[in-house]
Image (tube, rainbow, N blue to C red):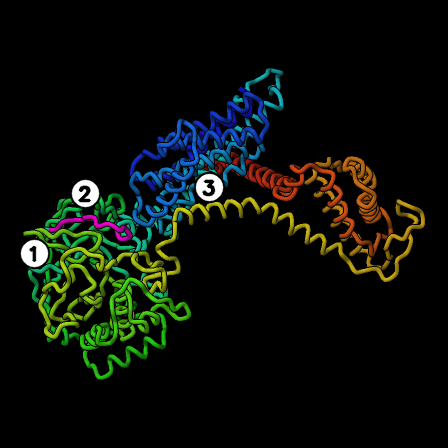
């Protein structure tokens, strides 16, 4: 098998290894089988076309045909006969559109959806073609790492914080395999190797230099992969997780653990669905239960809410705190059995507030008593069945009015911080004027979100992009639960009282003694801290817009004249008017028309096609990386042109020492600035040498500038003007090197442009394109710099090894005697 075919097969294997990051996206391994078949077909088409000695463009076309045929077999439309038809491509377009919808409806890991599987197979197939061409055709395997790295950018974009490192290691091994295979192929093409005694050896037999290189490469890869995990300052680092309360449980809520996540996006896959799906069922001894909760956001910014990573001990390391001990508040204990379906896959488990015992969960789980969050860094809630015993406090408005202001030295003071907004501050002062207790201030803010003040529930928010989101919501007085909860928390903090946003589910639909909770019951509300009573829930969202809403004596339904007890005020049946709480923090409500994102929103509407966005990001990143050599070449040329431009000559004089027609006017003026003239000539000559390298004109450093210029004219097939310009540059460099007085005032920049234009005119299209996009002079410079850096590294390692070899502990013992 020839080298190109062998490299093509290695490129296919490296592409498969580079696709490992997709394992973090899909819930099963169906994608791997389809990707494997796609890459095999692409590689087979490459081997076949190279066996038949097709040209490079035909090889690329053959791989594209193989990819399209394979996708047709895997994802048929039903109108083709083994080969794609016009209806096939329409079906492909529908699959891409379906993938865009699925990205809005499902959270990672996603199920086996045809649209997502098609995008994965087509994307990996396209990467396989690019890697094959870069490796086997253009012989640039190093550049093949860019499309392979683009695959890893997909989980980086999907995971909001922690990204699994194992797939990256697998992909890196594939990339190193590709580089090693290319290097071995180059050695084989160079010839057979011989040892010092004349014995010929196989190409795979190691040499001392190769062994040293492999050791350095291995150490470099290990350090590059493990160092970010060990350094404790890196979010989610291994050392940080091991030292976190000694629990061994990372603080992250995303898959893989570590770091912080966006609570608004934690249920995106369920909340953005147009259908109604059952997420969990609850049986509780409490007659009128309040909301299940799974997380809190305690950071408020102008763009919405954020959360800190929970921090607690695992459930097997001690009992949960009991708030009733030593408290003057009356608590009632209840029992609940929770069963979660496979539609709810997250690492935060829904629980009622103040759980005292939790049992039945499979896997490792931890509880944060401050946030009241049950979380895991290893398993999800899918198909979990567990039971809890929890306490329900019985507050009365009279009791809550006894709460004292927060002490100045309290750690909760940080939860009163909020970005400055004059409109909000003025509004809070108006509402709390004359209120003497903390509870009355909170109650005044809570009641201000009623229809009496013009507020209403809607999922279509008008756009006011010229003002902050909090001010926009308070002025428009229209929004959904995310905005109500965040706005109330913001205003309560502005009044100097700690507040945060809680996430969870309303009570759902009751059937006998079981509550069925669907994606329509997802909700957000506000929790306010009152000294001596803890965190008190307030749901400011109008109850009519919330499915399964509940109210209490201390936070009654503002739309009713009487203050109910903990009775439900919202409809118990799921409906389109349900409150969707956990939408994206950078997006409007799932039902929004893409207008103002409000407090919890950001800049991207829900209708964005995330698949197209991710592909666009990957393509843009790839193009940007590919343009780095060209950009570097342009900047270097501009720098040299600025150095050689000089000032226009005052008087044009004839210089008989120049080549060309005797007595011709050359536009050269001799001045006294010899140092600057020599530097200009050297810069112009360096640019000419790089131009020759770009256009594949051989460079011989042993030649004189004049001989090099004459050879350039001959080999570059330059016309009259470019030839005269080349001779001018050669004469300028020659006089700068050897003459007492260098050439001054010459239009070296113009001469460089003429030479480059002449070489471009006589070169082939491939050479011209390569000189622009991948300038060989830049690539050669980088390779030489890497080689020099590697040499210095090996020399330093050799010196360190020799130093360690000379070190002998016995010398210290002899001196001690």
Residue range corresponding to the magenta coloring = 271-282
Is 279 covered by the magenta stretch?
yes
Residue 752 in picture, x, y percent from top left = 75, 48
Quadrant in which residue 677 is drawn: bottom right
Of residues 631 and 404, the one nearer the viewer is 631
- Mark nearer the N terminus (1 vs 3): 3
Say which residue label 1 marks: 334
Residue 602 in picture, x, y percent from top left = 37, 61
Say if residue 676 shows up in the picture.
yes
Say which residue label 2 marks: 383
Residues tagged 1 and 3 counted as in contact (Cβ below 8 A): no
- Mark nearer the N terminus (3 vs 2): 3
- Mark nearer the N terminus (2 vs 1): 1
Residue 453 in picture, x, y percent from top left = 24, 76
Q: In what quadrant of the picture does the C terminus appear?
A: top left
Distance from the alpha carbon under mark 3 to that under mark 2? 35 Å
* Side (left or right) of 596 relative to 684: left
Q: Residue furthest bottom?
A: 434
Distance from the alpha carbon under mark 2 to that under mark 1? 23 Å
Residue 318 in picture, x, y percent from top left = 16, 51
Say which residue label 3 marks: 149
Of residues 404 and 526, the one nearer the viewer is 526
């Amino acid at each position: 098998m020839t080298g190109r075919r062998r490299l093509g097969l290695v490129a296919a294997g490296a592409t498969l290894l580079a696709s490992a990051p997709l394992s973090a996206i899909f819930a099963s391994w169906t994608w791997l089988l389809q990707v494997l078949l796609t890459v095999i077909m692409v590689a087979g088409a490459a081997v076949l076309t190279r066996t038949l000695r097709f040209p490079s463009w035909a090889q690329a076309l053959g791989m594209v045909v193989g990819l399209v045929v394979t996708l047709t077999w895997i994802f048929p439309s039903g109108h083709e006969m083994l080969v794609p038809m016009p209806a096939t491509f329409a079906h492909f377009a529908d699959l891409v559109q379906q993938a865009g919808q699925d990205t809005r409806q499902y959270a990672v890991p996603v199920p086996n959806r045809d649209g997502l599987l098609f995008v994965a197979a087509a994307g990996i197939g396209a990467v396989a073609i690019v890697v094959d061409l870069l490796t086997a055709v253009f012989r640039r395997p190093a550049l093949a790492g860019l499309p392979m790295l683009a695959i890893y950018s997909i989980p980086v974009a999907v995971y909001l914080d922690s990204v699994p490192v194992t797939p990256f290691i697998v992909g890196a091994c594939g990339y190193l395999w590709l580089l090693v295979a290319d290097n071995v192929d180059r050695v084989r093409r160079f010839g057979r190797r011989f040892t010092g005694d004349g014995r010929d050896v196989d190409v795979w037999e190691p040499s001392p230099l190769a062994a040293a290189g492999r050791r350095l490469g291995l150490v470099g890869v290990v350090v590059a992969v493990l160092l970010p995990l060990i350094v404790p300052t890196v979010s989610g680092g291994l050392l940080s997780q091991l030292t976190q309360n000694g629990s061994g449980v990372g603080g992250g809520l995303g898959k893989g653990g570590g770091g912080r996540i966006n609570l608004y996006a934690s249920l995106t896959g369920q909340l953005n669905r147009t259908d109604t799906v059952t997420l969990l069922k609850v049986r509780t001894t409490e007659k009128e239960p309040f909301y299940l909760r799974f997380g809190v956001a305690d950071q408020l910014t102008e763009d919405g809410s954020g959360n800190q990573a929970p921090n607690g001990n695992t459930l097997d390391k001690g009992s949960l705190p009991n708030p009733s001990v030593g408290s003057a508040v009356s608590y009632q204990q209840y029992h609940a059995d929770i069963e979660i379906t496979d539609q709810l896959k997250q690492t935060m488990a829904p629980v009622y507030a103040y759980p005292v015992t939790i049992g039945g969960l499979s896997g490792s789980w931890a509880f944060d008593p401050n946030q009241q969050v049950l979380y895991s860094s290893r398993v999800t809630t899918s198909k979990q069945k567990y039971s809890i015993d929890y306490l329900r406090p019985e507050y009365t408005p009279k009791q809550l009015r006894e709460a004292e202001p927060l002490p100045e030295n309290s750690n909760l003071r940080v939860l009163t911080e909020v970005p400055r907004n004059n409109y909000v501050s003025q509004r809070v002062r108006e509402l709390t004027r004359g209120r003497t207790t903390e509870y009355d201030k909170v109650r005044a803010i809570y009641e201000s979100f009623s229809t009496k003040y013009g507020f209403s529930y809607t999922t279509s928010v008008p756009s006011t992009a010229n003002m902050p989101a909090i001010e926009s919501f308070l002025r428009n007085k229209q929004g959904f639960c995310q905005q109500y909860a965040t706005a109330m928390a913001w205003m309560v903090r502005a009044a100097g009282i700690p507040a945060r946003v809680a996430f969870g589910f309303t009570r759902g639909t009751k059937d006998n003694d079981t509550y069925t909770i669907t994606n329509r019951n997802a909700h957000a509300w506000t929790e306010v801290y009152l000294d001596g009573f803890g965190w008190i829930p307030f749901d400011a969202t109008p109850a009519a817009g919330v499915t399964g809403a509940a109210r209490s004596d201390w936070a009654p339904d503002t739309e009713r004249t009487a203050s109910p007890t903990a009775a439900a005020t919202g409809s118990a049946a799921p409906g389109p008017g349900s409150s969707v709480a956990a939408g994206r923090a950078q997006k409007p409500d799932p039902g929004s028309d893409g207008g103002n994102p409000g407090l919890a929103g950001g800049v991207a509407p829900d209708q964005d096609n995330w698949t197209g966005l991710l592909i666009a990001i990957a393509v843009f990143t790839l193009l940007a990386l590919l343009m780095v050599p060209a950009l570097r070449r342009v900047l270097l040329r501009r720098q040299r042109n600025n150095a050689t431009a000089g000032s226009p000559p005052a008087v044009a004089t004839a210089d008989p020492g120049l080549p060309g027609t005797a007595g011709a006017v050359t536009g050269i003026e001799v001045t006294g600035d010899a140092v600057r003239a020599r530097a200009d000539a050297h810069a112009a000559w360096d640019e000419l040498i790089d131009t020759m390298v770009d256009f594949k004109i051989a460079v011989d450093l042993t030649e004189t500038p004049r001989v090099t210029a004459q050879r350039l004219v001959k080999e570059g097939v330059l016309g009259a003007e470019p030839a005269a310009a080349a001779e001018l540059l050669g004469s300028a460099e020659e006089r700068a090197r050897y003459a007492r007085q260098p050439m001054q005032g010459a239009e070296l920049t113009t001469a460089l442009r003429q030479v480059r234009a002449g070489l471009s005119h006589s070169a082939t299209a491939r050479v011209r394109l390569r000189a622009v996009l991948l300038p060989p002079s830049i690539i050669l410079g980088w390779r030489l710099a890497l080689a020099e850096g590697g040499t210095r590294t090996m020399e330093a390692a050799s010196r360190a090894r020799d130093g360690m070899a000379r070190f002998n502990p016995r010398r210290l013992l002899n001196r001690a005697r």
